[in-house]
Amino acid sequence: MINAPLVKTATGQDTGYTFEGPRIVDRTMPLTSGLTLEAYHQSGVVLGENPSSPLYDATMFAQGTILKNADGVILGDVQLTEFTGPDGDTAWACGLDWFAEGQAEGQGTYRLVQGTGKWEGIAGTFNTLGHKRARADDHVMLRCEIRWEVAPHRKWDYATLVADGGYTD
């Protein structure tokens, strides 16, 4: 019998807040239904409280698509976000905010789908919990929390992510 090395799984959680710059709209597409799609990107920083967290002193970069109604009200937002720590290790999260269903703006759930370096094999959730503070400019501050598990055996491919629960349809 071959002795396989033990694969250590690490778990953790953190709370903090994001400080995000304005959304830069890259492309707008009116739909025949009267709705509008806007593709955008946005950057900022995440300040966590746990030094072992992917949020701790991380920069963030997001790109996504917003769905607006004819009055310009945001109905939904689909987003891919990357969190990069000071050491360069990165974790990615995918999210969907659907405000048309009564979800409050600034609240959303994102699935951590993979990472690099110490975050390779990461899965879990990143939640935005609403506005930390109102702002007079076009920046946003959101309270947030993250729960994660890093399993080094979890690989960067769709079938494995679905099977291991790192990604769900």
Image (cartoon, rainbow, N blue to C red):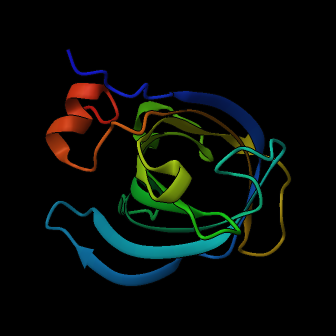
Q: Does the rendering let one see residue 94?
A: no
Q: Out of 50 and 132, give the one closest to the viewer.
A: 50
Across and down, in percent, residue 20 comes to 68, 67
Side of 85 where 6 appears, left or right: left
Decide if residue 110 is on the left or right side of residue 160. Answer: right
Q: Quadrant of the C terminus?
A: top left
Which residue corresponds to the image point at 20% horizontal and 27% vertical from the top-left? 163
Q: Is residue 108 left or right of residue 123?
A: right
Q: Is residue 131 left or right of residue 89?
A: right
* Residue 136 at x, y percent in the picture: 84, 70
Q: Quadrant of residue 69?
A: bottom left
Q: Please name the residue shown 59% across and 38% down the image.
A: 127
Find residue 152 and report its horizontal and vertical position in percent.
Answer: 41, 39
| Residue at (20, 14) in percent of width and height | 1
* Quarter of image, res 28: bottom left
Q: Where in the figure is residue 117, as x and y percent of width and height?
A: 50, 58
Placement of 23 over or under 3, stated as above or below: below
The residue located at (52%, 34%) in the rendering is 103
Is 87 situated above or below 56? below
Q: Is residue 67 visible?
A: yes
